[in-house]
Image (cartoon, rainbow, N blue to C red):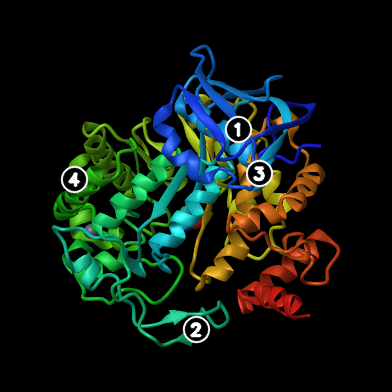
């Protein structure tokens, strides 16, 4: 039985083995891939020489591939593009699992969705270039193709902007970090009072390096500058960007903050366009994320500048002002050849430009706006919090729940306007790489199948069997899979789903590390 993840469309075992190692000569089309592929191939003693031939078949869809192990011990791969050729080899690597042979197979495969994404919040906590590269390595192996880089937040600005150096000199640094949600309302959370973030940002040189590394692995990067909410780090540097112009610190409170950028004044438009100018030089993929989530309008309601702008433009309300802002920024991005993406609250305002792509993470008002958006022929990305958010405990959201994600959970039947699926990893309560690994990799692997595998080929029990069979493989590519008792959510001693979720939230709010501590304890035994 083949243990491939994501499960391919059609695969048959022909019986016997075919050599696949660094002794296998890579030949044929797509030869620009060979330098990337060769070092990934198994380097084993007494491997047998043979050939892997890449052939272009322009009748095939993008990213699709066809592998045939031929009777003369060679491997033939057909695809219409380099992505398909690359993914064929990713499949062979899983089949080989470090050995110099694979079972002889014939595999026909193609993805369900075009956008198979992972988002990493590098603002709440910073993740090194090496850590990001390692995640990109894993994503490539499981055929995920979009890395959404969440770079800015209330609590830290993490990308160098040459025109505004203060953003990283000052905007990267907060005074303390809240460790759990206990006592949040009274601002009495347990806290680490060590300053966080000095020097923790990506230089433009590092961004170029990561973009190039990702490109070699068939991964495109979408940068996100979250605005006009989640913008306090920028406001701490440039108070004139807010409605009140009050001097504030980079936030050390999590959650939704009401101090947002003022969209009634002209300076924000210039500021954002300057940032876009620099970022468009760094990120070649034609998509740009402008955030737009969680934007309380309290300040705008009483700001003379915002109110004047609303009157002058004849806008209906403050939500329409956000749409106006989004449309101006999106038009600017369009001039630079970019599509705009934003979290689905951007649909709350009237007259949003319909070329903007909402990322649907939260259910609002019976989802009337999102469903109409798709029905009208516009595109959307699916990321519903209750299924795919990776930061919460597995007791709240076991792997099985994440695996069951897809357009069907929204009651959406026609998939033609679903650009794809994406899982975000928020890091308010993830402070170290071991916890990041535990919360991320099992779910990332499940998401690879959500994004790639045809709906009729999905089966959770079979997925879990394959996952356990490939546990060693994932460890070997530095993607440790959480233990089964963790990812099944068996950590709070509750059998009924309702009680498990309720207790899971209670325990996670009190200590986001509770499952991690259980895992560590188990490892000691
Ligand atoms: C979000 O989780 N605020 C997009
Ligand atoms: Zn204002």
Q: Residue at x 22, y 54 (%)?
A: 306
Along the viewing direction, whichever of 140 and 127 lies nearer the viewer = 140
Distance between the Cα atoms at labels 4 and 3? Answer: 53 Å
Along the viewing direction, whichever of 259 and 70 lies nearer the viewer = 70
Q: Which mark is residue 204?
A: none
Q: Quadrant of the N terminus?
A: top right
Kindly tell me whether mark 3's CB lies below 8 Å from ligand 1: no
Q: Furthest residue to the top?
A: 59
Quarter of the view holding residue 92: top right
Whether residue 395 is situated above or below residue 513 in the rendered picture = above
Q: Which residue is mark 1?
A: 49
Q: Which residue is mark 4?
A: 277
Q: Residue at x 43, y 34 (%)?
A: 33
Distance between the Cα atoms at labels 2 and 4? Answer: 41 Å
Residue 80 position within the rendered picture, expressed as x and y whole percent measured from the top left: 49, 19
Mark nearer the N terminus (3 vs 2): 3
Left or right of residue 172: residue 125: right
Mark nearer the N terminus (4 vs 3): 3
Q: Residues within 10 Å of mark 4 (few under 14, many from 20)?
A: some
Residue 336 position within the rendered picture, expressed as x and y whole percent measured from the top left: 22, 34
Q: Depth-wise, is mark 2 or mark 4 nearer the camera?
A: 4
Where disc 3 sits, the SS reads loop
Quarter of the view holding residue 6: top right
């Amino acid at each position: 039985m083949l243990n491939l993840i994501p499960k391919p469309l059609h695969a048959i075992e022909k019986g016997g083995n075919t050599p696949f190692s660094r002794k296998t000569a890579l030949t044929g089309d797509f030869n620009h891939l060979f330098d990337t592929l060769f070092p990934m191939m198994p380097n084993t003693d007494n491997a047998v020489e043979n050939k892997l031939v890449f052939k272009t078949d322009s009748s095939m869809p993008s990213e699709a591939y066809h592998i045939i192990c031929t009777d003369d011990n060679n491997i033939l791969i057909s695809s219409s593009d380099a992505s398909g050729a690359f993914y064929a080899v990713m499949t062979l690597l899983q089949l080989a699992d470090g050995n110099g042979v694979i079972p002889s197979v014939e595999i026909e495969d193609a993805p369900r969705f075009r956008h198979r994404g992972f988002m990493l919040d590098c603002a709440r906590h910073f993740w090194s270039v090496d850590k990001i590269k390692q995640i990109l390595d894993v994503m490539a192996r499981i055929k995920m193709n979009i890395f959404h880089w969440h770079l800015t937040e209330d609590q830290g600005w993490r990308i160098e902007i040459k025109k505004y150096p203060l953003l990283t000199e000052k905007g990267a640094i907060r005074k303390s970090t809240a460790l759990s949600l206990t006592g949040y309302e009274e601002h009495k959370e347990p806290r680490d009072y060590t300053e966080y973030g000095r020097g923790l940002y990506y230089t433009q040189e590092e961004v170029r390096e990561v973009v190039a590394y990702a490109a070699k692995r068939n991964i495109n990067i979408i940068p996100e500058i979250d605005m006009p909410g989640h913008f306090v780090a920028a406001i701490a540097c440039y108070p004139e960007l807010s409605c009140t112009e009050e001097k504030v610190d980079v936030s050390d409170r999590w959650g939704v903050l009401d101090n947002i950028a003022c969209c009634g004044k002209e300076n924000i438009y210039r500021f954002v366009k300057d940032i876009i100018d620099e970022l468009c030089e760094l990120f070649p993929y034609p998509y740009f994320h402008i955030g737009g989530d969680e934007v309380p309008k309290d300040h705008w309601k009483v700001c003379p500048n915002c109110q004047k702008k609303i009157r002058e433009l004849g806008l209906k309300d403050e939500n329409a002002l956000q749409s106006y802002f989004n449309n101006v920024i999106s038009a600017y991005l369009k001039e630079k050849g970019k599509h705009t993406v934003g979290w689905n609250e951007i649909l709350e305002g009237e007259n949003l430009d319909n070329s903007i792509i909402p990322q649907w993470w939260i259910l609002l008002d019976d989802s009337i706006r999102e469903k109409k958006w798709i029905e009208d022929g516009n595109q959307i990305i699916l990321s519903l919090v209750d299924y795919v958010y990776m930061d919460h405990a597995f007791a709240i959201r076991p792997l099985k729940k994440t695996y069951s994600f897809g357009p069907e959970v929204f009651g959406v039947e026609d998939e033609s306007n679903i650009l794809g699926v994406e899982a975000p990893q928020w890091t308010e309560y993830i402070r170290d790489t071991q916890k990041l690994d535990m919360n991320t990799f099992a779910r990332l692997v499940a998401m690879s199948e959500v994004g790639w595998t045809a709906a009729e080929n999905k089966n959770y029990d079979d997925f879990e069997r394959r996952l356990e069979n490939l546990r060693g493989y994932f460890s070997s590519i530095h993607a440790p899979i959480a233990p089964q008792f963790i990812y099944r959510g068996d950590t709070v001693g509750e059998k009924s789903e309702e009680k498990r979720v309720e207790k899971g939230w209670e325990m996670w709010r009190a200590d986001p590390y509770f499952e991690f501590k259980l895992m560590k304890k188990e490892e000691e035994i």
